């Protein structure tokens, strides 16, 4: 009988069995061993086996034969690190498993303060066999280290190495000073970069990584690798390569690091740090830019050189150098100090030479953590192009603070808002609140948002105010007259009259010096009805000078508009001035308004918004109405930008205990001050203005000329990119060629070298320049019955003579040739007619002009020498609704509108009056409220005589140019978005028509645009009483009745100009549209009851 084997002999047998299994499949043997280590009952025995295998490999006789025979090895640390005081770490290495440049990386980390890692939560990216994670935990005792690798084999080997170092050779735990083992401090997880931490919502104090930087020469192989079925040799051939990641740095081999950084931004704590070991092949500038453009501050902690592996294929890098100005950086041997290119390095290596590359360690901190996180949280949702163009690197910290804060605000706004919110014409309530908050916090001036009216620019505010009063004489600071209509500045008639009662209401402007003592002399002598002035530096200091100016204008009876733009600082320590000091202790006199244009920002030099301050409620309301009539609105994004600056200043301001002093009452005004002009009073009285939301309820707006459909992702991306980019070239904001292409494709309209393209923030602002030209030449503006109510009201506000062309509901309120001919024949003699045509889609009826119809109208206008304004602003989203008049004929989307304006105008050459083509790049590009107006004209004196005061910002030009490019390059994604919006509008139009018809309305129909007309036939003559409304219903008061009873706001017949016909805008967000349909049904029940009376 054989004697039992001794413990030592038994272990030898177990070691031999393990090695035999490894010779057949090293990874299979490792998996079986890990199962034993994971099981508490077999853990100690499995660890003793590991110890015995380690000792066998430590035998000098083993040599490299063991590695070749068993496909793995067990090695201790580099003795150099042990000499520096690092603890001993023993690890298994296996082919196919990435081993970072651990010794060099660890040496660099060792130069960091202990506080970076101690008690912190750390993630190591590309942990490979786990060496670095174990070393970090041993030396710095972090709270937790997450070792992450996409290779499941690597994670299993890393876990074996964890047991190898957490337990001694007897299988007993090794405790540190806190009575914890490495098993308590380290976890290894299979993870594509940081996906494991992201999915588990783990916030990190520190992220470290030594990630492959060489692009795979066979990129199509990487996505298809099945790691568990691949050989060790194949995995080893791939483990030092990285695949394309869809970022700008891909071509330089830095794509994987770039994606790791972007993922880390979401998970790193605000005061966290990222540390990456990076090979310097792409060049130090490019390596550092990877972090800088993503909003990091960086430090180059440590730098060395590594020999480039002799079998590395540099051909891809050589190809990049051949096709770009970029040069990679290599060095001859380790001692070289002059960089050589990849091409030179490749040739040198092929001839037997050795080259090296730099190895650097970078530590990175986010410069504005919360803001940068918001930016990347927005960009992660499918905006790779924007991510590639993002640049958050700045030489000036103040510029960085301003721009990054706004980009974060813009990112949050675009992410949270599916559509642009509805804001009142007076300006965004939030922005007006911030203005008043700034005035109170920094200057102790108590104002309310109702005291503030926002304008697109300072010049717009001045012109609108002058137009509101139409003074016979105004004195205007010579620095503020540059954008005023030239007619106002060249009129030689100065009439002394107390009010504006003359029919023409001609404004005469006299330029004045800025010094107030000389200005006061002018005021006393000339007795102007309106004074517009800025402040000289000397006058800004003396409050007495301002008081004197107030008294003189009061005595003379002049309205005073005081521009403080140059003396209002948006800074944390702003200086005061005489006006603001006065307002802190005195109520602003009712004849005075303060004007301020905000242009002083450090990032976007041409971005402007302005506001006026007045404590007279009626004046503020009238000013806001001029914005709605003459401009349409003030850019929301411009208000957001300056609102962001004000928000930062208010957040910085430490509230000091400061009792608000009681303000003295305003001066009593004389009775002889002029009021608003007759044309302004009449237009404001007859116009129908938008209604703001009340504090108690939210209004459903079917009364506005804009779309509330969701903003497509492509539009959001273009908007954000336009603000995020740095150094945008002029050619990238030049939209002329894009608009030329648009007009040629849609209307075959020629835009040659003789044509001017004038830009405006809205088409309405441009339209009003045409009205001014009509008034100047004593013409008459001819509108078809049923024209957009704001256009008609604006013409009347500007004191234009108007005529109406009769239209019929049976033809969708189109202009019929006979009616046009009769109207032009019956106009006043010797007055030139300006005919307004909305098309191809008619606003607001939604009907369409065919090519034949528009040609016939143009011929009639030509015969009568009438100027023509073709307004295409509401075209571009035509569709085929259920009431399409041609059964069985599909709507010709690809060929619509089939207009041939070039051929038509050529046929009329010689006797055709100017044709002005007005347009807006909003609906057609699904911009959901963001607008960009343009006007095509051969009238070269137009822009000189009537300067456009609210130009689109360059970022908006960039956005629209890019979107037009997508449209005409037939980008599939963008084309699908437009098609989806067209289908949405078609569905909404059909639904609205059926709802209205079922509720007693007669609907005209609709084939395009965003609105339709309907007549409340069943309601007319009904007595109705609800919530402060009582009366007999008609087309005018049904708006108020609907609003008070249901919260739905529509445009009444006052707005449409057609007896009893109302306008409904159906381009609403889906939830709002459903609520609107419910309101229409509920109104029927309230007025008509549940009967079938309708």
Image (tube, grey):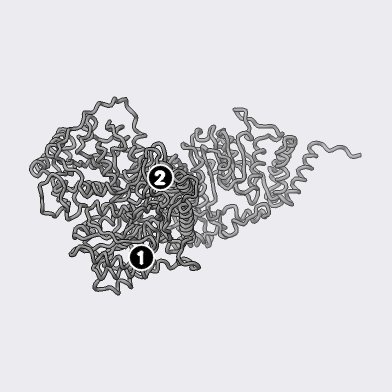
Q: Position of residue 945 (x, y in %)?
A: 20, 57
Give the residue drawn at x 45%, y 65%.
Answer: 885
Q: Is residue 452 left or right of residue 522?
A: right
- Is residue 462 something that shows in the picture? no
Residue position marked by numbered label 1 in the rendering: 743
Q: Residues within 10 Å of mark 2 (few under 14, many from 20)?
A: many
The one nearer the camera, 90 or 264, is 264
Q: Residue furthest bottom?
A: 907
Give the residue drawn at x 42%, y 55%.
Answer: 1002
| Inter-mark Cα distance, 1 to 2 | 40 Å
Q: Secondary structure at mark 2?
A: helix
Q: Is residue 54 above or below residue 998?
A: above
The one nearer the camera, 346 or 714, is 714
The one nearer the camera, 270 or 901, is 901
Give the residue drawn at x 53%, y 38%.
Answer: 203
Quarter of the image containing the N terminus? top right
How many numbered dots are placed on residues in this image? Answer: 2
Q: Residues within 10 Å of mark 1 (few under 14, many from 20)?
A: some
Which is in the foreground here, disc 1 or disc 2?
Answer: 2
Quadrant of the rendered image containing residue 298? top left
Residue position marked by numbered label 2 in the rendering: 1042
């Amino acid at each position: 009988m054989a004697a039992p084997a001794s413990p030592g002999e038994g272990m030898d047998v177990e070691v031999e069995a393990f090695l035999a299994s490894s010779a057949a499949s090293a990874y299979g043997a490792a998996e079986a061993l890990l199962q034993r280590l994971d099981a508490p009952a077999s853990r100690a025995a499995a660890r003793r086996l590991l110890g015995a295998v380690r000792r066998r490999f430590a035998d000098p006789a083993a040599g490299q034969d063991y590695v070749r025979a068993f496909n793995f090895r067990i090695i201790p640390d580099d003795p150099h690190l042990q000499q520096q005081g690092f603890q001993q770490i023993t690890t298994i290495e296996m082919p196919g498993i990435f081993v970072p440049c651990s010794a060099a990386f660890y040496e660099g980390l060792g130069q960091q303060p202990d506080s970076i890692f101690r008690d912190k939560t750390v993630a190591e990216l590309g942990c490979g066999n786990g060496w670095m994670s174990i070393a970090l935990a041993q030396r710095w005792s972090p709270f937790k280290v997450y070792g992450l690798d996409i290779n499941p084999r690597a994670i299993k080997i890393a876990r074996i190495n964890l047991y190898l170092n957490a337990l001694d050779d007897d299988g007993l735990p090794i405790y540190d000073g806190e009575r914890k083992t490495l098993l308590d401090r380290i976890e290894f997880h299979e993870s594509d970069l940081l996906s494991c931490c992201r999915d588990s919502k783990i916030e990190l104090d520190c992220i470290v990584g030594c990630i492959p930087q060489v692009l795979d020469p066979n990129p199509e192989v990487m996505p298809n690798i099945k790691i568990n079925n691949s050989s060790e040799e194949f995995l080893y051939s791939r483990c030092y390569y990285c695949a394309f990641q869809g970022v700008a740095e891909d071509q330089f081999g830095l794509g994987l690091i770039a994606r790791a950084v972007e993922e880390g931004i979401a998970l790193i704590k605000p005061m966290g740090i990222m540390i990456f070991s990076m090979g310097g092949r792409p060049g130090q500038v490019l390596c550092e830019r990877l972090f800088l453009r993503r909003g990091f501050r960086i430090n180059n902690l440590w730098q060395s050189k590594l020999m480039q592996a002799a079998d590395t294929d540099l051909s891809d890098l050589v190809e990049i150098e051949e096709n770009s100005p970029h040069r990679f950086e290599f060095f001859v041997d380790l001692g070289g100090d002059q960089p050589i290119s990849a091409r030179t390095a490749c040739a040198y290596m092929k001839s037997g030479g050795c080259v090296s590359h730099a190895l650097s360690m970078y530590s990175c901190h986010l410069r504005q953590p919360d803001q940068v996180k918001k930016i990347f949280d927005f960009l992660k949702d499918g905006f790779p192009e924007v991510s590639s163009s993002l640049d958050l690197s700045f030489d000036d910290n103040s510029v960085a603070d301003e721009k990054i804060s706004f980009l974060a605000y813009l990112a949050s706004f675009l992410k949270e808002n599916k559509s642009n919110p509805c804001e009142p014409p007076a300006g965004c309530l939030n922005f007006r609140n911030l203005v008043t908050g700034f005035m109170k916090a920094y200057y102790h001036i108590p104002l309310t948002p109702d005291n503030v009216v926002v304008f697109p620019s300072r010049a717009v505010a001045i012109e609108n105010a002058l137009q509101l009063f139409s003074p016979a004489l105004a004195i205007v600071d010579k620095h503020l007259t540059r954008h005023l209509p030239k007619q106002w500045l060249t009129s030689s008639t100065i009439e002394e009259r107390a009010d504006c009662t003359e029919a023409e209401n001609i404004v005469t402007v006299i330029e004045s010096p800025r010094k107030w003592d000389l200005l006061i002399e002018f005021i006393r002598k000339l007795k102007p009805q309106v004074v517009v002035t800025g402040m000289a530096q000397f006058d800004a200091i003396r409050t007495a000078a301002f008081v004197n100016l107030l008294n003189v204008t009061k005595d003379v009876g002049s309205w005073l508009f005081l521009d403080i733009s140059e003396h209002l600082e948006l800074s944390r320590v702003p200086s005061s001035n005489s006006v603001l000091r006065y307002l802190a202790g005195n109520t602003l006199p009712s004849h005075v308004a303060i004007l301020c244009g905000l242009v002083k920002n450090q990032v976007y030099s041409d971005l402007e918004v302005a506001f006026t301050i007045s404590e007279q409620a009626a004046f503020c309301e009238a000013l806001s109405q001029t914005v709605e009539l003459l401009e349409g609105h003030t850019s929301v994004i411009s208000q957001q930008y300056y609102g962001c600056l004000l928000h930062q200043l208010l957040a910085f301001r430490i509230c000091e205990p400061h009792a608000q002093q009681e303000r003295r009452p305003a001066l009593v005004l004389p009775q002889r001050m002029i009021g608003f002009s007759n044309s302004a009073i009449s237009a404001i009285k007859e116009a129908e203005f938008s209604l703001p939301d009340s504090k108690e309820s939210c209004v459903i707006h079917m009364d506005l000329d804009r779309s509330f459909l969701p903003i497509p992702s492509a539009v959001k991306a273009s908007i954000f990119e336009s603000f995020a980019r740095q150094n945008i070239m002029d050619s990238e904001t030049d939209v002329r060629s894009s608009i030329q292409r648009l007009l040629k494709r849609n209307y075959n309209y020629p835009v040659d070298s003789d044509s001017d393209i004038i830009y405006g923030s809205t088409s309405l602002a441009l339209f009003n320049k045409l009205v001014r030209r009509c008034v100047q030449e004593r013409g008459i503006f001819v509108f078809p019955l049923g024209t957009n109510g704001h256009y008609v009201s604006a013409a009347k506000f500007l004191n234009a003579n108007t005529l109406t062309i009769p239209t019929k509901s049976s033809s969708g309120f189109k202009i019929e040739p006979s009616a046009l001919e009769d109207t032009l024949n019956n106009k006043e003699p010797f007055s030139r007619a300006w005919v307004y045509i909305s098309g191809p889609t008619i606003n607001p009826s939604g009907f369409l002009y065919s090519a034949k119809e528009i040609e016939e109208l143009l011929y009639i206008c030509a015969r009568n020498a009438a100027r023509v304004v073709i307004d295409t602003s509401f075209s571009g989203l035509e569709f085929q609704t259920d009431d399409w008049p041609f059964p069985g004929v599909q709507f010709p989307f690809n060929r619509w509108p089939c207009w041939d304006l070039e051929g038509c105008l050529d046929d009329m050459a010689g006797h055709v009056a100017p044709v002005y083509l007005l347009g807006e790049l909003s609906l057609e590009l699904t911009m959901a409220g963001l607008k960009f107006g343009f006007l095509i004209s051969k009238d070269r004196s137009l822009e000189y005589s009537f300067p456009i005061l609210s130009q689109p910002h360059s970022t908006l030009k960039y956005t629209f140019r890019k979107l037009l490019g997508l449209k005409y390059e037939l980008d599939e994604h963008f084309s699908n978005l437009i098609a989806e919006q067209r289908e949405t509008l078609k569905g909404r139009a059909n639904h609205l028509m059926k709802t209205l018809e079922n509720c007693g309305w007669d609907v005209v129909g609709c084939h395009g645009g965003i609105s339709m007309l309907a007549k409340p036939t069943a309601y007319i003559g009904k007595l109705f009483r609800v919530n402060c409304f009582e009366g007999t219903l008609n087309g005018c008061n049904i708006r108020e009745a609907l609003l008070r009873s249901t919260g739905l706001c529509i445009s009444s017949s006052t707005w449409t100009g057609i007896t009893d016909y109302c306008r409904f805008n159906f381009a609403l967000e889906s939830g709002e549209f459903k609520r609107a349909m419910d309101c229409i049904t509920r109104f029927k029940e309230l007025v008509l009851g549940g009967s079938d009376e309708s």
